[in-house]
Image (cartoon, grey):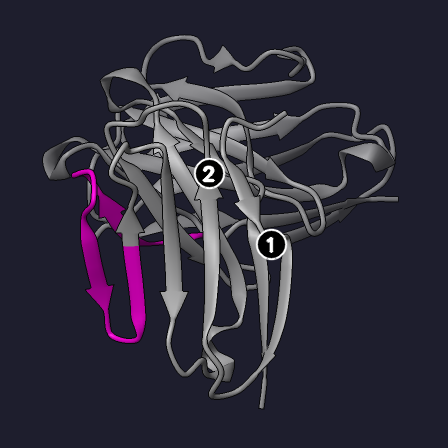
Amino acid sequence: TQLLEQSPQFLSIQEGENLTVYCNSSSVFSSLQWYRQEPGEGPVLLVTVVTGGEVKKLKRLTFQFGDARKDSSLHITAAQPGDTGLYLCAYKGAAGNKLTFGGGTRVLVKP
Amino acid sequence: GAVVSQHPSWVICKSGTSVKIECRSLDFQATTMFWYRQFPKQSLMLMATSNEGSKATYEQGVEKDKFLINHASLTLSTLTVTSAHPEDSSFYICSARDQTSGYEQYFGPGTRLTVT
């Protein structure tokens, strides 16, 4: 059982549609991070959310941290084929050390 | 800035042989690097934490004698898969922690290992 549960595991949508990816846990986190990984590459950090209830925007991507700091969501508006990839949430262990990732959500945006 | 490279990007080796993967921080010093393994359609799983000048710390279930880690300098960590078997075929990714930027981790592009 993973500490961070991501849902759905896979999402296939048409270009222009919206989508939401969830990252849930029963634990409280000081912060959560979201990464995107494209096939054959390493993950790239998109955002770090720190404050409960926080909303951050990165162009068409909107990230929200739950009020209780147990969950987070990623919403993509008007998805484009370039948004295709594996979206991972992660938390840092004590003293900012090792990262633990959720299971990931694979997103496919069809043109 | 904050670029991490890996070499090779892909490698094919025969069962029973050893293969070394390098991870370099190109424009910053990293006292700590991390090695992850990723199987197809799965997430990243941390294998070990590599500390410059000291022994690596392995996660539970990872064989330290099979996955040898050396972090001999502030910009280079190596992972050697010894006596590789087909089940070791995977995507190996390293990350390096930059102490000057809030301990953020920057990931390398990964190394695809195929053991035949």
Query: Which residue appears at 60% of the width and 34% of the height?
Result: B20
Quadrant of residue A111 in the image? bottom right
In 3D space, how far apart are the residues under numbered discs 2 and 1 (Cα atoms)?
11 Å
Mark 2 and mark 1 residues within 8 Å of each other at the beta carbon: no
Q: Which badge, 2 or 1, comes first in the chain's sequence?
A: 1
Which residues are the magenta region? Answer: A42-63
Query: Which residue appears at 30% of the width and 75% of the height?
Result: A60
Query: Which residue appears at 21% of the width and 48% of the height?
Result: B27
- The quarter in which the C terminus of chain B is drawn is top right
Characterize the local packing of mark 2: few (<14), some (14-19) or many (20 or more) Cα atoms within 10 angstroms.
Answer: some
- Relative to residue B56, is residue A50 drawn left or right? left
Query: Which residue appears at 16% of the width and 31% of the height?
Result: B99
Quadrant of residue A8 in the image? bottom right
Badge 2: chain ID: A
- Residue at disc 1, secondary structure: loop
Q: Label 1 sits on what residue type?
A: Pro
The label shown at residue A31 is none
Q: Label 2 sits on what residue type?
A: Asn
Characterize the local packing of mark 1: few (<14), some (14-19) or many (20 or more) Cα atoms within 10 angstroms.
Answer: some
Task: Quickly name the residue at label 1.
Answer: A8
* Residue A36: % across, % down: 44, 58
Note whether A5 is above or below B32 in the view shown: below
* Residue A14: % across, % down: 58, 85
Of A59 and B85, nearer the camera is A59
The answer to whether any part of residue A42 appears in the image is no
The answer to whether any part of residue A81 appears in the image is yes
Q: Are marks 2 and 1 on the same chain?
A: yes
Of B78 and B107, nearer the camera is B107
Task: Quickly name the residue at label 2.
Answer: A24
- The quarter in which the N terminus of chain B is drawn is bottom left
Quadrant of residue B44 in the image? top right
